[in-house]
Amino acid sequence: MDMKVMTATSGNGTDATLAPKILARDVNVHYGEKHALKEVNVDIPQRSVMAFIGPSGCGKSTFLRCINRMNDTISIAKVTGSITIDGSDIHDPALDVVQLRARVGMVFQKPNPFPKSIYENVAYGPRIHGLASGKDELDEIVTTSLKKAGLIAEVKDRLGDSGTSLSGGQQQRLCIARAIAVGPEVILMDEPCSSLDPIATARIEELIDELRANYTIIIVTHSMQQAARVSQRTAFFHLGHLVEEGETADIFTNPFDKRTQDYITGRFG
Amino acid sequence: MTLVFFAALLMLIGTAYLVGRSRGFAFAGEGTAHSRPAYHGAFLAIALLAPMLAVYLIGTPLADRFVETRALSGLPSAITGDELQRSAALREIVSYADGQLAGSPSPEIKAAGERYASDRATAGWSILLGSIGLGLLAALLAFRALSPDFRARNQVERFVKLLLILSATIAILTTVGIVFSVLFESARFFQRVPVLDFLFGTQWSPQTAIREDQVGSSGAFGIIPLVAGTLLITLIAMLVAGPIGLFSAIYMAEYASPRFRAFAKPLLEILAGIPTVVLGFFAALTVAPLIRGFGESLGLSVASESALAAGLVMGMMIIPFVSSLSDDVITAVPQSLRDGSLAMGATHSETIKRVVLPAALPGIVSAMMLAISRAVGETMIVVMAAGLAANLTFNPLEAVTTFTVQIKTILVGDQEFDSAKTLAAFALGLVLFLFTLTLNVIALTIARRYREQYD
Amino acid sequence: MTEIFSIEKAPATAERNAFVAARIAQRYRSERLFRFFGLAAVAVTAAFVVILLTDILIRGIPAFTQHRLALDVAVPADVLPAGTEASTDVLRSVDFAKIVRESLRGAFPDVSERKRRKALDGLLSSGAGDELRRRVLADPSLIGGTVSLSAPLSADADLQLKSGSSGIERKLGTGTASLSGPAGKVSVTSTAEDFSAAAQLVRAAIERQKDRLATEVTRLEQLLPQTVGEERQGLDQKIADLKQRVASYGTRLSAAGGDIDLDSSTPTVLVALGDAWIKAERVTPRSIAGATLVPSSSTAPAAPGAWRMLVIETPESNRTTSDQEIAWLESLAAENRVSRHFNWQFFTSGDSREPELAGIRGALIGSILTLLVTLALCLPIGVAAAVYLEEFAPKNRLTDIIEVNINNLAAVPSIVFGLLGLAVFLNFFGLPRSAPLVGGLVLALLVLPTIIIASRAALKAVPPSIKEAALGVGASHQQAVFHHVLPLALPGIMTGTIIGMAHALGETAPLLMIGMVAFIVEVPDGLTSAATALPVQIYLWSDLPEVAFQSKTAAAIIVLLGVLFVMNGAAIYLRRRFERRW
């Protein structure tokens, strides 16, 4: 399994697909007194998977949450610098946070399906954004999204069951389907497999690899093996700094920075 | 006598404790004693206290009964046969015995009074001496048990644990007491008024039952008008408290800044702490005339004790209740669900309406049920602002009456024991208790499940 | 697996963005609306609290002061029955009220008619005599001398003085006024048109009254077709009467020269000139004709600004105080003999049928005694129960039942506890009615669940490591709990107890059931003497018809709320002071 993904990764990593989708410049985040993220500059290429790695508390999740402005929900968080998606600044007053989040979906550490039916979970985004004009269209979006998330075979006969009745791995794929249903361009994943068993994890990793054909995916992970398996590029964060960023293969085999090397070889973490 | 007893009790306990403790010190001096000296003292004190108190608490009422019976035995049966005369005579005898009887008593009373006084003294002394004797005996036995190996601490702790258990069961005893007190009297009521007439009758006029020949006459004890009145006022109260309480809970939990909360929370707490008698005064003297004036300016006829006034103020009373319960429930919804919704591009209110509230629904339902139960059982606001007339109406501008108003009206002031009217109050209490109990049990069960779901 | 690979199409980004953008404005509108509803709900609640407290304060604050009349009372030397000493018993039989009344009559020697004399006597509180008796008892040498007494006024007179200027228009005369005679039917003539404004006001009031009656006539006439028989006759009669009154008002209004006749259904015009008070019966722009309420000692003309008039808008027939009484009070006030004092009596005396004498001392003591019983029972039992349930109880069915039971009891209506008290404590155990002992017992059962729940929460908040540390050095389970866990939980338990006591203090319904609702003048002196409690006193007073009692009720509420705020403040202080985060 590992080998297969790895080969797929290196095979697909052509320059054409790596055109930058997201540009971050001088991003700083303060949580009250705490300077959580310091001067982050990074280009994130289109239709590929980028992994953020680093020890816990290094700022990787904080940076991820900047990209769809989830830090807005924390009253003490202050974000400075610029992040652009396809050239438009996400802090531009003309671009609403609601619109931004419709473009940038997110999957969380712990599966968080709404306490509603599987169908309603997936239909939630299209409903609030008014993406479907009728029941048929909504049905189609739900089915397509579940298909893309690789869940349809398991749930097609019980779309009315509660989303919380699924297993952990299924719940996480439901959350991915829910994010896909809005048709985002970018999907942020914040340690999506940390609460899953190895088999469910493998399933999600396969899914990520398949989704990258159509979406720009950024995944935060504490597992270096996972980063190596699923991502084309990797960024290493440490103490709020983005230490090093580059092709995944390069980072893991030939790190530039001493700290990256120490982390990868397990000196700390 | 009471004073003498407790003085003796305290003295003896003190002595027992000191004796036991010094014995304990002696053991400690000899080498390895199991328990510390204070426990030996406490053990001895308990050994003395328990039998003394038991004798006193059991003996006193028995002796009282006995002394009274003997005092009354000399009186003619005409007096002793009648409940009222009997208790009047007894009062006279007691005050004669106390030397406080004004006027000149009849010879029988005088004789009975003297007998009563001497019997009472005898009984008092025998109880006192009996309890001291038994206490000392027990203490002596306990003293002989004391030894360095004696596990005094364990014995004392067993006693303390017994006290703790007794305290915990008081709550159960209270419930049992409530059930029995309303059940017994209600049973007697239902011997006179058929249950079905009570539950489905549309006429409520307990006053008619004052006349002997009409006791239990059909139709006077139908609770349908009371049910209608109670529900009407509760409905109005919930129409006020439901939305306002829920919306303020949403605002406080989801939108309010910490500074706003610091101002609004105490405000709600103030409202929650205002006694209902104050709200009743406000309802009767300020709100009711306002509503009446306003209604009449619109050409409506409004009763001066309209259901609307009582309902509105009761609604205000329940707001903090609904609000604080709902606030807890809303805050208990995991943040991850909110994040999930917000991350999809839902606005804050969409997240609340479509994710948070549906997730919190069981808790909110439970809060509303508890609020209804409180509105149904609330007394002072309706006593002061709602009427007495048992109108069967759903017009909020008319006067209606409620369960609690009727219970209060029947039981306050002169009451005849054993009349159907007095007993009816307990039957109303039974219905009220069962209704609120059902609501509470359901609500608490829902709330418990809800908490377990997110804990 | 195969399905995953069937994705060909990329997401329709542009289309989706257009959809989202189209609805965004409307979605934000509903967001603002929703938020506004939330804020409005909080605002409504806040407004209610503010209105409630303001209303109570406005009603109640006047009751904390009382008007008193300075009287020099001559105590006759022969006030005591021959051959007796000035002792409590002897003085009790002396009618001191009469002596005070005589003294007041001295101020208005013209009052001789029985009815007017009664009205004059009625200005004084029936407590004025008691006041004098106390003074004489304290200092028997006053007998035969003169006592400067500050006598309480009756509730109606007090209220009239407190209402002060509301509804009364006061005006100084601008012309020189002359009085036609010292007493009886007189007229006052001014050199200026001083009375035209008053005449206009009276006129307007009569017109309003006339309109109101006319509307009533129309309304009744519409009812006519629906009524028959006797009812019809009654209605006809009523309509005829009303029509006649409308007509009489009409003629009054159309009188020549702007003259207007006054009676008890119109506003009152009083003129004070020198020491005389004249009530107008007819008003013309430059003069009034009427009768003296207080006679004059001279008929000398009064200069501009040296005389005045009072126009009272409410007709005499709608007032509790008559024109005559107002004239007396105004005349006494003009002599600086009326003054406003803090009403200490409100805190030092028991209940009374007379509003001006009624106080809350009895109720306050009753409440304190009741709460003492409640506290003495609740605190040990509640804490013991909480300790057992939290620390020692095995997890079994019985414990479960106790838990459910406690939570349920906390939600049982308070009146049901009253029924329990009535049936068990009064009827079964035969404890005395109306006694603080029984009240305390019932309230103890009522607040026990609250205290148990609060104490358990406080015990639970103490980290298990503390207990484990104690157990680790060889303490028994009970020693660990009583020496280490309980002391640390104590602030939380105290906070819960204070809140429970505050709840008990405000509770009314169960006390009604056990008879703490009687009219009790004496201040209770023991746990078994008849007593009432503060909230019950509030309920009792609120039920009384006298207007003065409404104010007393509100004042008692202010005291009750004050005590409650202090208790809750103490609870908050305790929580802040001792709050510990583990």
Image (tube, coloured by chain):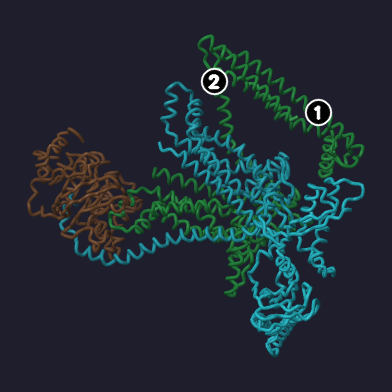
Chain colours: A brown, B green, C cyan
Q: Taking B346 as reference, is C191 left or right?
A: right
Q: Taking C234 as reference, is C375 left or right?
A: left
The residue that appears at 58% across and 63% down in the rendered structure is: B309
Q: Position of residue B175 (x, y in %)?
A: 60, 41
Q: Position of residue B395 (x, y in %)?
A: 59, 67
Which residue lies under the disc numbered 2?
B153
Residue B121, numbered label: 1
Q: Determine if marks 1 and 2 fall on one subunit.
A: yes
Local crowd at mark 1 within 10 Å, few (<14), some, or many (≥20)? some
Is residue C262 visible from the viewing direction of this image?
Answer: yes
The residue that appears at 63% across and 46% down in the rendered structure is: C417
Query: In the rendered image, which quarter contains the C terminus of chain C?
Result: top left
Is residue C428 placed above or below B361 in the rendered structure? above
Q: Position of residue C556 (x, y in %)?
A: 64, 53
For disc 2, the chain is B
**What kind of element bears circle 1?**
helix
Q: Position of residue B424 (x, y in %)?
A: 69, 52
Q: Earlier in the sequence, mark 1 or mark 2?
A: 1
Front position in the image: B348 or B61: B348
Front position in the image: A144 or B42: B42
Q: CA distance from mark 1 to mark 2?
A: 40 Å
The residue that appears at 27% across and 41% down in the rendered structure is: A195
Local crowd at mark 2 within 10 Å, few (<14), some, or many (≥20)? many
Q: Amino acid at mark 1?
A: Ala
Front position in the image: B425 or B160: B160
Q: Amino acid at mark 2?
A: Arg
